[in-house]
Amino acid sequence: MNRALLVIDVQNEYFTGALPITHPAGHLEQILAAMDAAAGKVATIVVQHHFSDPDKPFFRKGTPGWELHPEVQSRPRDLLVEKTLPGSFTATPLEDWLRRHRIDTVTIAGYMTHMCCDTTARQ
């Protein structure tokens, strides 16, 4: 079994922007612990969301809120995927990359579990 860790939307918007995550306690630390455990053993894919519509006030590409959280940015990753929709597979290279690397099992960590993580899991 070949595995990968998907780290979805751990971006500044959820920390210093308009959409702060406050629950559960220790959420970022748990994501970072998963990344640290995966480092060098399990492929790590970081997914970064942006809205292509300039009228959207969040996740505007190139803004501080769009940037990855510095702790995620500083950790090793095998692939960075940019997405514009909730699902990490829609119009991205993720599926092809996973197939080329024969990865058949993914673990998902990140934010907007009811939207982006859920959509990615169902895809």
Image (spheres, rainbow, N blue to C red):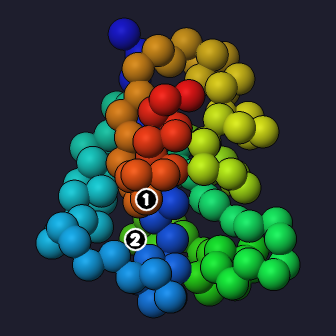
Residue 82 visible, this orientation: yes
In the image, residue 36 above or below residue 28: above
Of badges 1 and 2, the one in the foreground is 1
- Give the spatial CA distance, label 1 vs label 2: 18 Å
Q: Give the percent coordinates (x, y) of residue 102.
A: 55, 13
Q: Earlier in the sequence, mark 1 or mark 2?
A: 2
Q: Please state which amino acid type lies under the numbered disc 2.
A: Glu
Residue placed most toward the observer, 117 or 42: 117
Task: Residue at 41%, 20% (x, y): give it.
Answer: 105
In the image, residue 113 above or below residue 39: below
Element on which disc 1 rests: loop
> In the picture, which quadrant includes the C terminus?
top right
Element on which disc 2 rests: helix
The numbered mark at residue 112 is: 1
Residue 7 visible, this orientation: no
The quadrant in which residue 27 appears is bottom left
Q: Please state which amino acid type lies under the numbered disc 1.
A: Met
> In the picture, which quadrant includes the N terminus?
top left
Q: Give the percent coordinates (x, y) of residue 82.
A: 69, 53
Query: Where does label 2 land, which residue?
Result: 71
Residue placed most toward the observer, 39 or 96: 96
